[in-house]
Amino acid sequence: MMYNNLLVEIKNRILYITINRAAKLNALNKDTLAELSAVIKDFITNAKAGVAIITGDGPKAFVAGADISEFANFTVAEGQQLATDGHTNVFDLIENSPKPIIAAINGFALGGGLELAMACHIRIASENAKLGLPEVTLGLIPGYGGTQRLTQLVGKAKALEMILTADMVRAEDAKSIGLVNEVTPEYALITKCEELAEKMLSRAPLALTSALKAVNAFYSKDKNGYIVEIEEFGKLFGTDDFKEGTQAFIEKRKANFTGR
């Protein structure tokens, strides 16, 4: 499938998704969100890719926010529908992906851009990255999960400070508060993400899926994370990968997982 706002490529079972709107600092407009939804849905079912990396084109921005011009004149109902569609079709879809998705944060990750990064399972930032939720400067609040995911990641006090002041944090500060996993030089950003992706690809795919499901259950109000963990743990005993993994351990060799 051809995309107008994304560059999409699969190499060595890694799906590379680059938001290709550098002239607009990779802002998320309606069409870009629709394309992201389509590519993530394909990734979930595509056996050729086991891990995805999302980044932005150019050195300035991962995603500098949403395309404000598209919703400046929205009504209350239209604003609520905008947020609902974003949650359902993109951000929740990413968070609940059964395969790992890594955000490679190059430059600004603001507003919807930070919300996109927070929906990913792991965040790696370049040294020049700046992260923030500036929505209150527009008379809004984050609408794509930012109030919830930022609080989960950094705690209530820091989340409120960032949201209420609209201040940006630099990459190293983002790491210190748990907003990003690692900080790398700009030139090493994708390489670091690839290292993590390759390590995950060497693990049992069904176990990765179960781990993602169990961890996400902790944040679901209608699920008991302990019960989900027990169920997922038990199910894995019926997989070929469990048999292969345990046999490889006993035989002191590298496991050859097949995702069955």
Image (tube, rainbow, N blue to C red):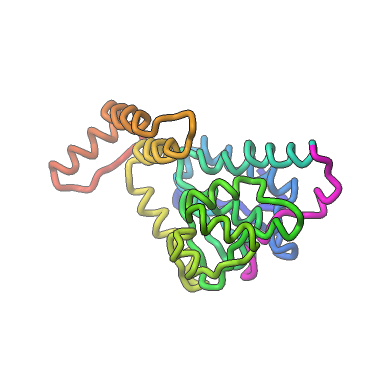
Q: Is residue 11 visible?
A: no
Where, quadrant-wise, is the N terminus in this rendering? top right
Q: Nearer the viewer, residue 27 or 190?
A: 27
Residue 90: percent from left, percent from top? 62, 42
Q: Is residue 170 visible?
A: yes
Instruction: Name the image quarter holding residue 106.
Output: bottom right
Depicted 34 relative to depicted 125: above or below: above
* Left or right side of 237 for 147: right
Query: Residue furthest toward the right?
Result: 73
- Residue at (35%, 53%) from the top-left corner? 199
Where, quadrant-wise, is the C terminus in this rendering? top left
- Residue at (70%, 49%) from the top-left corner? 32
Query: Residue furthest toward the front?
Result: 157
The kind of secondary structure the magenta stretch mainly shows is loop
Residue 235: percent from left, percent from top? 32, 27
- Residue at (52%, 51%) from the top-left corner? 151
Residue 252 covered by magenta stretch: no
* Left or right side of 56 for 23: right
Instruction: Name the image quarter holding residue 167.
Output: bottom right
Residue 59 covered by magenta stretch: yes
Q: Nearer the viewer, residue 25 or 194?
A: 25
Residue 255: percent from left, percent from top? 25, 44
Residue 137: percent from left, percent from top? 73, 60
Which range of residues does the magenta coloring cover? 58-76
All told, the count of numbered labels is: 0
Instruction: Name the image quarter holding residue 132.
Output: bottom right
Q: Nearer the viewer, residue 206 or 95?
A: 95
Q: Nearer the viewer, residue 33 or 199?
A: 33
Depicted 27 relative to depicted 219: above or below: below
